[in-house]
Image (cartoon, grey):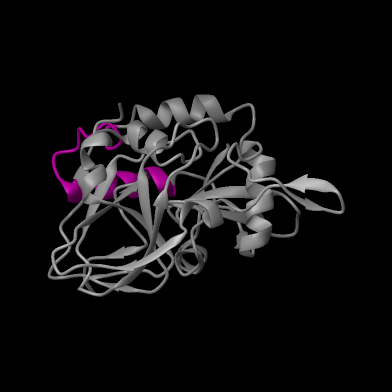
Amino acid sequence: MPLFRLEPDIANTFAEKPEIAMGVQIGRIKGTSTPVPIFDAQVALLLDDKAKEQIENLLRQDWMMGLAPSSAKQGEDFQQWSNDLDSVAVEPLPLDESLTALQSIFGPFEDAVPTTKGGIPVPTPPFVIRLPIGDQTGADDVYYRYERFPTSRRVNQSKRTIKPETYAVPSSELEFMPTGFSAVARCALPKPLPACWRWEIKPTAKTYFRVGAVVPLFGQSGGGVEVYFPKSVDNRGPIADPVVLPRF
């Protein structure tokens, strides 16, 4: 089966590592050279000939369709679905290796700025292009993070914090990302899973972040604005349960 769950210790390890894009990391199956995308530090995806069928079945789950009666029930149903998956032992790749592996999995970066290495054009890593400006949050700023599953390993409600090296978008993007697949398109995220769970983040004032425009990647349009918090974020007050968006 192409979808695999991460055991808690492995998931916790990925939750402490930087993201390449919102909810996206790259791991390597232990004992092999095979790279796999990791979504929201919880599920690994091996793109094989069975992937389409399994993903279509996933999209028909009640919790994915927003039909569960409560956030708690969504989380329980997701956990049951996840527990039924086979587990896989993966390890995080360093960021530079992750960028190269990302291209091999999803194709070349469409926004590559040509540079050369030994006379051969190579792409500039996307975060160099996408996040050129550093800034600080204001006292009333609000940001949003879109994830693919009901439970988050980067947003900690009990501690009111967000893990370091995490992506989000400013509140100005809200009207342009009303569904899970529109978030994938506007943030130029790798397919194929919609990002239907939207977390509201209210960083304390003067939290440092980087910001830039989302350029086209992975056959997605991009066009949005995204931010990246390199250090842990303290939230102003409690963090609400995520809003559940329609898939499309």
Q: Position of residue 31 (x, y in %)?
A: 75, 59
Q: Residue at x 62, y 48 (%)?
A: 36
Q: Is residue 40 left or right of residue 219?
A: left
Indicate whether 70 appears above or below 237: above
Q: Residue at x 41, y 33 (%)?
A: 185
Q: Residue at x 55, y 35 (%)?
A: 218
Q: Position of residue 214 (x, y in %)?
A: 43, 44
Q: Indicate the quadrant where residue 240 lies.
A: bottom left
| Magenta segment | 62-83
Compare residues 57 and 169 and report the one nearer the observer.
169
Question: Magenta stretch containing residue 65, yes or no?
Answer: yes
Compare residues 110 and 180 and report the one nearer the observer.
110
Compare residues 145 and 109 and report the one nearer the observer.
109
Question: Magenta stretch containing residue 157, yes or no?
Answer: no
Q: Residue at x 19, y 67 (%)?
A: 138
Q: Position of residue 224 (x, y in %)?
A: 36, 41
Indicate whether 44 appears above or below 51: below
Indicate whether 159 appears above or below 213: below
Number of marks in the image? 0
Q: Is residue 204 left or right of residue 52?
A: left
Quarter occupied by the C terminus: top left
Q: Indicate the quadrant where residue 237 lies.
A: bottom left
